[in-house]
Amino acid sequence: MLTGKKRVLEVGCGDGFGMPVVCQSVDHVHGVDFEPLLLEDNKRRLAQWPCSFSVLDIVSEPPAERFDAAYSLDVIEHIPAAQENAYFGNICAALPPAGVLIVGTPNVTAEAYATEASRAGHINLKSHTALRAAMAAHFDNVFLFSMNDELVHTGYYPMAHYLFAVGVGRRAP
Protein backbone atom coordinates (compact mmCIF):
# COMPACT_ATOMS: atom_id res chain seq x y z
CA MET A 1 0.00 0.00 0.00
CA LEU A 2 2.99 2.30 0.44
CA THR A 3 5.12 1.03 -2.44
CA GLY A 4 6.80 3.84 -4.33
CA LYS A 5 6.22 6.51 -1.70
CA LYS A 6 9.19 8.84 -1.20
CA ARG A 7 8.89 9.78 2.49
CA VAL A 8 6.83 7.78 4.96
CA LEU A 9 6.19 8.50 8.64
CA GLU A 10 5.87 5.75 11.25
CA VAL A 11 4.04 7.09 14.31
CA GLY A 12 4.85 5.24 17.53
CA CYS A 13 7.69 3.28 15.95
CA GLY A 14 8.88 1.79 19.25
CA ASP A 15 11.78 -0.55 18.55
CA GLY A 16 11.34 -0.26 14.78
CA PHE A 17 10.62 -3.98 14.46
CA GLY A 18 8.76 -3.78 11.13
CA MET A 19 10.55 -0.79 9.66
CA PRO A 20 13.03 -2.78 7.51
CA VAL A 21 10.06 -4.38 5.71
CA VAL A 22 8.61 -0.97 4.83
CA CYS A 23 12.06 0.40 3.90
CA GLN A 24 12.26 -2.20 1.12
CA SER A 25 9.41 -0.56 -0.82
CA VAL A 26 9.72 3.18 -0.06
CA ASP A 27 12.58 5.66 -0.35
CA HIS A 28 12.75 6.68 3.31
CA VAL A 29 10.92 6.01 6.60
CA HIS A 30 11.05 8.45 9.50
CA GLY A 31 10.02 6.97 12.85
CA VAL A 32 8.74 9.03 15.75
CA ASP A 33 8.16 7.93 19.32
CA PHE A 34 8.17 9.61 22.72
CA GLU A 35 10.77 7.18 24.11
CA PRO A 36 14.31 8.47 23.35
CA LEU A 37 16.17 5.35 24.52
CA LEU A 38 14.36 3.19 21.97
CA LEU A 39 15.17 5.65 19.21
CA GLU A 40 18.88 5.75 20.06
CA ASP A 41 18.99 1.96 19.87
CA ASN A 42 17.05 2.04 16.56
CA LYS A 43 19.60 4.42 15.04
CA ARG A 44 22.35 1.93 15.83
CA ARG A 45 20.52 -1.27 14.86
CA LEU A 46 18.86 0.04 11.70
CA ALA A 47 21.75 2.16 10.37
CA GLN A 48 21.91 0.17 7.12
CA TRP A 49 18.28 1.00 6.22
CA PRO A 50 16.97 4.25 4.69
CA CYS A 51 15.39 5.47 7.90
CA SER A 52 15.71 8.15 10.55
CA PHE A 53 14.20 8.82 13.96
CA SER A 54 13.14 11.68 16.18
CA VAL A 55 11.52 12.07 19.57
CA LEU A 56 7.93 13.28 19.28
CA ASP A 57 4.78 13.01 21.38
CA ILE A 58 2.22 12.91 18.56
CA VAL A 59 -0.68 14.07 20.75
CA SER A 60 1.27 17.20 21.74
CA GLU A 61 2.58 18.42 18.39
CA PRO A 62 2.75 17.54 14.69
CA PRO A 63 5.95 16.37 13.01
CA ALA A 64 8.15 19.21 11.76
CA GLU A 65 8.55 17.56 8.35
CA ARG A 66 6.03 16.58 5.65
CA PHE A 67 5.46 13.04 4.38
CA ASP A 68 3.68 11.32 1.48
CA ALA A 69 2.11 8.75 3.78
CA ALA A 70 2.07 7.56 7.38
CA TYR A 71 1.34 4.43 9.34
CA SER A 72 0.75 3.79 13.02
CA LEU A 73 0.46 0.23 14.27
CA ASP A 74 -0.46 -0.75 17.82
CA VAL A 75 -0.57 2.88 18.98
CA ILE A 76 -4.14 4.23 18.99
CA GLU A 77 -5.25 1.76 21.66
CA HIS A 78 -2.75 3.43 24.02
CA ILE A 79 -3.97 6.98 23.28
CA PRO A 80 -6.61 8.32 25.70
CA ALA A 81 -9.90 8.89 23.86
CA ALA A 82 -9.78 12.57 24.85
CA GLN A 83 -6.48 12.92 22.92
CA GLU A 84 -7.50 10.92 19.87
CA ASN A 85 -8.43 13.97 17.79
CA ALA A 86 -4.97 15.47 18.48
CA TYR A 87 -3.36 12.16 17.44
CA PHE A 88 -5.14 12.16 14.07
CA GLY A 89 -4.87 15.92 13.58
CA ASN A 90 -1.12 16.01 14.16
CA ILE A 91 -0.52 13.08 11.81
CA CYS A 92 -2.72 14.66 9.13
CA ALA A 93 -0.85 17.97 9.48
CA ALA A 94 2.22 16.17 8.09
CA LEU A 95 0.37 14.74 5.05
CA PRO A 96 -0.54 16.29 1.69
CA PRO A 97 -4.21 16.48 0.64
CA ALA A 98 -3.90 13.14 -1.19
CA GLY A 99 -2.06 11.60 1.77
CA VAL A 100 -2.49 8.07 3.05
CA LEU A 101 -2.63 6.89 6.67
CA ILE A 102 -2.70 3.25 7.77
CA VAL A 103 -3.79 2.60 11.36
CA GLY A 104 -3.70 -0.86 12.92
CA THR A 105 -5.14 -1.85 16.28
CA PRO A 106 -6.43 -4.89 18.16
CA ASN A 107 -10.18 -5.32 17.79
CA VAL A 108 -12.21 -4.58 20.92
CA THR A 109 -14.01 -7.90 20.36
CA ALA A 110 -10.71 -9.74 20.95
CA GLU A 111 -10.24 -8.13 24.37
CA ALA A 112 -11.97 -11.07 26.05
CA TYR A 113 -8.99 -13.24 25.03
CA ALA A 114 -6.26 -10.76 26.02
CA THR A 115 -4.00 -11.09 29.03
CA GLU A 116 -4.52 -8.89 32.06
CA ALA A 117 -1.31 -6.96 31.24
CA SER A 118 -2.51 -6.33 27.70
CA ARG A 119 -5.91 -5.14 28.89
CA ALA A 120 -4.28 -2.71 31.34
CA GLY A 121 -2.38 -0.92 28.56
CA HIS A 122 -5.14 -0.94 25.97
CA ILE A 123 -7.26 2.00 27.09
CA ASN A 124 -8.84 2.88 23.72
CA LEU A 125 -9.69 -0.29 21.83
CA LYS A 126 -11.95 0.09 18.80
CA SER A 127 -14.58 -1.90 17.00
CA HIS A 128 -14.58 -1.77 13.22
CA THR A 129 -17.35 0.84 13.25
CA ALA A 130 -15.53 3.04 15.79
CA LEU A 131 -12.24 2.82 13.88
CA ARG A 132 -13.96 3.65 10.59
CA ALA A 133 -15.74 6.63 12.19
CA ALA A 134 -12.50 7.94 13.74
CA MET A 135 -10.70 7.75 10.40
CA ALA A 136 -13.66 9.15 8.43
CA ALA A 137 -13.50 12.32 10.50
CA HIS A 138 -10.07 12.96 8.94
CA PHE A 139 -10.13 11.24 5.53
CA ASP A 140 -12.45 11.30 2.53
CA ASN A 141 -12.05 7.57 1.91
CA VAL A 142 -11.60 4.84 4.52
CA PHE A 143 -10.96 1.18 3.72
CA LEU A 144 -11.21 -1.38 6.51
CA PHE A 145 -9.46 -4.75 6.71
CA SER A 146 -9.53 -7.58 9.24
CA MET A 147 -6.63 -9.74 10.33
CA ASN A 148 -6.47 -13.13 12.00
CA ASP A 149 -3.04 -14.63 12.55
CA GLU A 150 -1.10 -13.48 9.47
CA LEU A 151 -4.11 -13.40 7.12
CA VAL A 152 -5.47 -9.96 6.15
CA HIS A 153 -8.99 -10.07 4.73
CA THR A 154 -12.27 -8.21 4.35
CA GLY A 155 -14.23 -10.81 6.26
CA TYR A 156 -16.50 -10.61 9.26
CA TYR A 157 -15.07 -7.78 11.38
CA PRO A 158 -16.38 -8.86 14.82
CA MET A 159 -14.39 -12.10 14.59
CA ALA A 160 -11.13 -10.39 13.59
CA HIS A 161 -8.38 -10.18 16.16
CA TYR A 162 -6.84 -7.09 14.53
CA LEU A 163 -8.15 -4.24 12.38
CA PHE A 164 -6.47 -2.07 9.76
CA ALA A 165 -7.97 1.17 8.47
CA VAL A 166 -6.54 2.91 5.42
CA GLY A 167 -7.45 6.57 5.10
CA VAL A 168 -6.93 8.25 1.73
CA GLY A 169 -7.38 11.92 0.94
CA ARG A 170 -7.09 13.82 4.19
CA ARG A 171 -9.82 16.30 4.96
CA ALA A 172 -8.88 19.96 5.31
CA PRO A 173 -8.32 20.91 8.97
Image: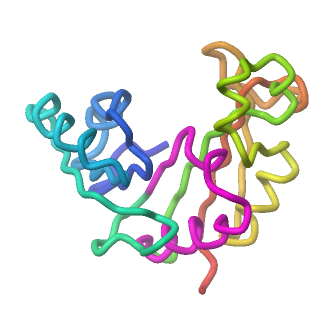
Of residue 17 and residue 123, the one placed in the foreground of this image is 123
Of residue 157 and residue 125, the one placed in the foreground of this image is 125
The correct choice, above or below, for 5 with respect to 47 in the image is below
Please give the name of the residue rendered at 56% of the width and 49% of the height, measured from the top-left corner.
Answer: 102
Please give the name of the residue rendered at 27% of the width and 39% of the height, measured from the top-left corner.
Answer: 38
Q: Which residues are magenta?
A: 70-95
Q: Residue furthest top?
A: 149
- Figure disc tally: 0
14 relative position to 120: left or right: left
Find residue 149 and report its horizontal and vertical position in percent.
66, 13
Of residue 173 and residue 82, the one placed in the foreground of this image is 82
Picture quarter containing residue 79?
bottom right
Find residue 31 and report its horizontal and vertical position in percent.
31, 50
Would you say residue 84 sits in the magenta stretch?
A: yes
104 relative position to 40: left or right: right
Picture quarter containing residue 51?
top left
55 relative position to 83: left or right: left
Would you say residue 57 sits in the magenta stretch?
A: no
